[in-house]
Amino acid sequence: MTSDSTKTTVKRGTDCIGVTISFVCHDGHGNVLLHKRSDQCRDEHGKWDNGGGALEFGESFEEGLKREIREEYCADVLETKFLGAFNNIREQNGTRTHWVNVVYAVRVYPEQVKNGEPHKIEELGWFRQDQLPSPPHTTLKRMVDFARAGGVFS
């Protein structure tokens, strides 16, 4: 992100608050789609993550959600459920970051899913919502708990 008047680069999440669309993709039968982060991701390499990405300027939450799922998983969105939002303030590699996570549950067809970002995603997997893989991304449990509280797995 740059400013025309100063031509300085502003980094979302560190120089200003970033907004990320986070999602828990599921098949409607208690299984969640997760991916293992590669060493080319910003952080948490080798950890299992639920998926998400930064909201782009001018995008609605729903547009960002559909774009990110197409980019990461090459899948169409069948159903969505808004689950909530939270402040995600933490330290990454010695730098304090601040993101607002807007969280959705999204049903997708499992047979349609494939790795759309092989440079960022080492592996894809479907897991029972009560049997998550290790090591988890720092927000994974929170995301699945959001989905449980939202009645996604009932």
Image (cartoon, rainbow, N blue to C red):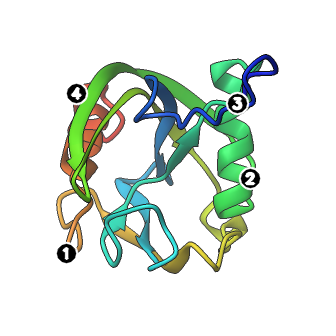
Q: Reading the chain from its start, which is encountered first: label 2 or label 1?
A: 2
Q: Amino acid at mark 1?
A: Ser
What residue lies at 23% left-to-right and 32% top-to-bottom? 89
Tag nearer the camera, 4 or 2: 2
Quick one: 127 or 47, which is closer to the camera?
47
On the rendered structure, is 65 left or right of 127?
A: right
Which residue in the structure is indicated by mark 2?
A: 70
Q: Amino acid at mark 4?
A: Ala
Query: Circle 2 — which element?
Result: helix
Q: Which mark is residue 56?
A: 3
Tag nearer the camera, 4 or 3: 3
Quick one: 35 or 125, which is closer to the camera?
35
3D distance between C-alphas at marks 2 and 1:
25 Å
3D distance between C-alphas at marks 4 and 2:
26 Å
Disc 1 to disc 4: CB gap under 8 Å: no
Q: Amino acid at mark 2?
A: Arg
Query: Circle 3 — which element?
Result: loop
What residue lies at 33% left-to-right and 68% top-to-bottom? 48
Which residue in the structure is indicated by mark 4?
A: 149
Query: Circle 4 — which element?
Result: helix
Which residue in the structure is indicated by mark 1?
A: 134
Percent position (x, y) of residue 45? 35, 74
Disc 2 to disc 1: CB gap under 8 Å: no
Q: Which mark is residue 126?
A: none
Q: Quadrant of the N terminus?
A: top right
Q: Is 48 above or below relative to 85?
A: below
3D distance between C-alphas at marks 1 and 4:
22 Å
